Image (cartoon, rainbow, N blue to C red):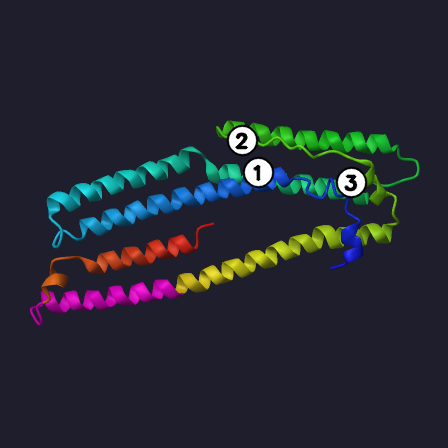
Amino acid sequence: MNTEMKNLIPSYNANIGEEFDKASMELKKLSEKYTKLYISFLFMGAFLADLTGTINPKISVPLAILCGLFSLFFYTRKRNRNLVEQWTYTRVIAETIKSEWFKFVVGAGDYPIKDSTDQQYDNDKFNRNVKDFIDKYEQQIHSLGGQYVKPVNVEITEESLEIRKKNLDTRVKYYEANRMQDQMDWYEKKSSIMSKKHTSSTKWFRIFIILSTAIGLMMTISFNDIIKIAFIENNDFFSIFLALAFALDTFTNIE
């Protein structure tokens, strides 16, 4: 990456949209938390229901029902808070403002750099555009019953205007180094994380599917009176391991 170009970015505006980035991360974490909770309780309910041969049904069945109710509660909670939709709108506004600011400082889009152009006119236009973006975002979040973020650093400073005074080649390199490269780095990092998750998910999914298949075969042998396996006969471990496989697969692929 071009270090010289990186150093050109005004310190104040370097983190433009940062509040939205943080808010989207919090929304994502909360969504993941609810997802893990309702899947965990759903699995525990199935687990207890299938262990009636080992645990007294008077205990296991009520507990299984209770787990099911907890799972329903957390699932409903997640859906009613519209966390995925809020995350989407917050990510969109974060990237929209970043893109608009970069267009402004490099003289692209609605902000061409011309000798005859009044700089204050471009400043006002940028501020109007950003305000329109934020107003739309606030309306979207409000319609979902969420709390929107108020940005504190979306404004033009003298430092920001220095980039507009550079020649075209410098401005292009600046954009490549600070916007394009930043996005490529983000996607590469995201791709690496997803690849590791996929590898882990595939490994554990296969292990539990193999175990459930083995248990299914043992249940078949026991039910056909070939070999009596009381512990297997009295509990549906086949269903338990299948449920566990899909639960773990979901956990490792939550986004």
Tell me the residue that label 2 is attached to. Answer: 141
Q: Are marks 1 and 2 in contact (CB under 8 Å)?
A: yes
Mark 2 or mark 3: name the one nearer the start of the chain: 3
C-alpha distance separating marks 1 and 2: 8 Å
Please tell me how crowded label 3 is: few (under 14), some (14-19), or many (20+) other residues with Cα within 10 Å.
Answer: many
Q: Find residue 18 and report its image quarter.
A: top right
C-alpha distance separating marks 1 and 3: 21 Å
Q: Are marks 2 and 3 in contact (CB under 8 Å)?
A: no
Which residue is painted at 26% across and 66% down in the image? Answer: 211
254 vs 153, left or right, is left
Q: Quadrant location of the N terminus?
A: bottom right
Which labelled disc corresponds to residue 104? 3
Please tell me how crowded label 1 is: few (under 14), some (14-19), or many (20+) other residues with Cα within 10 Å.
Answer: many
Tell me the residue that label 1 is attached to. Answer: 90
Name above or below for residue 207 compared with residue 139.
below
Which residue is painted at 64% across and 33% down in the image? Answer: 151
